[in-house]
Image (cartoon, rainbow, N blue to C red):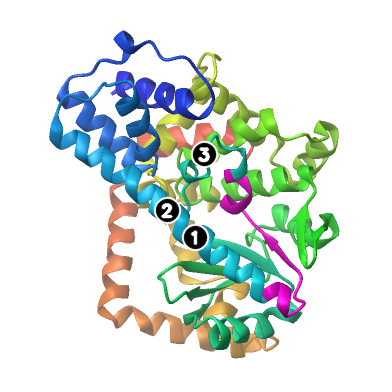
């Protein structure tokens, strides 16, 4: 598997980062190509890997060739659909005089050789909380958005064309160390013309690290954030001292340094050390959204063991409970009542199956896995 991982990273680097590919070095058996396809697809990178393989005539098997071509087609289609919808969203927000900030992929893809290479599963836009109801109302009446669901820091909606939107009223991650700065995001934004604003380069990078750290502590963040960081580190002009000050204040300076290093291992010419090897194993095993096993392993380290993890899951933090039960906000004395209401939901079939899988993962988590994750998190200073 180590050969497949190395080939995947080199092929991505050849397409996105300008690395030269030696065709003879990347000749694979059909079995290795199948593994390469499955691994790259699990991290939503099969379109980039496939493009490199096809461009260098490295796929002989017709069935595998079609699999990779399909991923390229889907990536281009997703980009066109998202880009078209983003244009409509910008128009409606501008017309209503609502200040907004484009987040994540909409900004990052401008640093890729081709914008379709940086895939996204949705559109992320930030508006002020005071403008949220006005914005969502406009999207429903003017653009036909449906399926409105309120989450911790955003409202999820679906466009008529099937594009998913996360309309953020906050970029907080429900983590005190990160949220102290993330809550002040608008103070780090400047006008980009009209009603559109953009974060300063330092804060934009800080947000990427914060989001990656959050997902890292919830089971994994996938390979793509490291590719983003590799490109941003080389193409984005920013004040390193100012960025490091933010990272240190939030307690993720060590994590950010190692994230840059792992990106350099994968897409540059830096050699692995023991910590980057541990991070690689953790990230690759988790896919784009992480795994339940990884999530449980991390949670047990944060909550000081199996019992702590279970208690943390039983008693949901107040802020998260308010998302599910908005009437609780401002009435903290009712939290025990709403916790009970939430517990009773376990009798719903889908919830019961989900909780059963989590308890099974808690029970089956090996001592070796717990030890490895604990050592990694300690070295990354994330505990």
Examine the image and state in which quarter residue 29 appears: top left
Q: Is residue 192 left or right of residue 308?
A: right
Indicate the secondary structure of the residue bearing disc 3.
loop
Point out the image quarter for the C terminus.
Answer: top right
Task: Name the residue carrying label 1.
Answer: 82
* Residue 326 at least partly seen: yes
| Number of other residues with Cα within 10 Å of mark 3, as a class: few under 14, some 14 to 19, many 20 or more | few
Point out the image quarter for the N terminus.
Answer: top left
Task: Name the residue carrying label 2.
Answer: 306
Q: Answer with mark 2 or mark 3, whichever residue precedes in sequence.
A: 3
Indicate the secondary structure of the residue bearing disc 1.
helix
Whether residue 95 is in magenta: the answer is: yes
The picture places residue 51, in percent across and down from the top left corner, at: 36, 32
Cα gap from disc 1 to disc 3, whole angstroms? 15 Å
Magenta region: which residues? 93-109
Cα gap from disc 1 to disc 2, whole angstroms? 42 Å
């Amino acid at each position: 598997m180590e050969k497949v991982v190395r080939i995947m990273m080199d092929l991505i680097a050849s397409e996105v980062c300008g690395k030269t590919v030696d065709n003879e070095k990347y000749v694979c058996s059909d079995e290795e190509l199948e593994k390469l396809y499955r691994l790259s697809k699990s991290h939503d990178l099969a379109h980039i890997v496939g493009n490199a393989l096809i461009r260098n005539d490295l796929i002989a098997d017709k069935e595998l060739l079609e699999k990779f071509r399909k991923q390229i087609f889907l990536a281009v289609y997703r980009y066109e659909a998202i880009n078209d919808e983003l244009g409509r969203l910008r128009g409606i927000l501008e017309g209503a005089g609502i200040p907004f900030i484009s987040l994540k992929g909409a900004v990052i893809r401008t640093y890729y050789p081709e914008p379709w290479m940086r895939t996204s599963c949705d559109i992320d836009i930030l508006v002020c909380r005071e403008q949220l109801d006005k914005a969502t109302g406009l999207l429903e009446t003017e653009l036909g958005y449906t399926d409105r669901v309120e989450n911790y820091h955003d409202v999820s909606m679906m466009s008529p064309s099937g594009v998913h939107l996360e309309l953020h009223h906050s970029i907080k991650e429900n983590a005190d160390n990160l949220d102290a700065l993330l809550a002040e995001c608008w103070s780090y934004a400047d006008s980009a013309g009209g009603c559109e604003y953009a974060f300063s380069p330092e804060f934009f990078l800080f947000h990427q690290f914060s989001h990656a750290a959050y997902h890292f502590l919830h089971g994994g963040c996938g390979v793509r954030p490291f590719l983003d960081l590799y490109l941003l580190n080389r193409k984005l002009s920013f004040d390193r001292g100012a960025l490091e000050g933010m990272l240190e204040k939030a307690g993720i300076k060590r994590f950010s340094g190692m994230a840059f290093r792992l990106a350099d291992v994968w897409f540059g010419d830096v050699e692995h050390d023991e910590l980057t090897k541990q991070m690689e194993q953790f990230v690759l095993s988790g896919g784009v959204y992480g795994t339940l096993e990884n999530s449980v392993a991390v949670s047990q380290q944060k909550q000081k063991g199996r019992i702590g993890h279970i208690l943390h899951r039983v008693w949901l933090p107040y802020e998260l409970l308010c998302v599910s039960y908005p009437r609780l906000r401002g009435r903290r004395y009712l939290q025990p009542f709403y916790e009970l209401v939430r517990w009773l939901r376990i009798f719903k079939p889908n919830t019961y199956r989900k909780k059963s899988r989590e308890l099974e993962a808690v029970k089956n988590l090996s001592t070796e896995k717990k030890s490895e994750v604990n050592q990694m998190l300690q070295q990354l200073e994330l505990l």
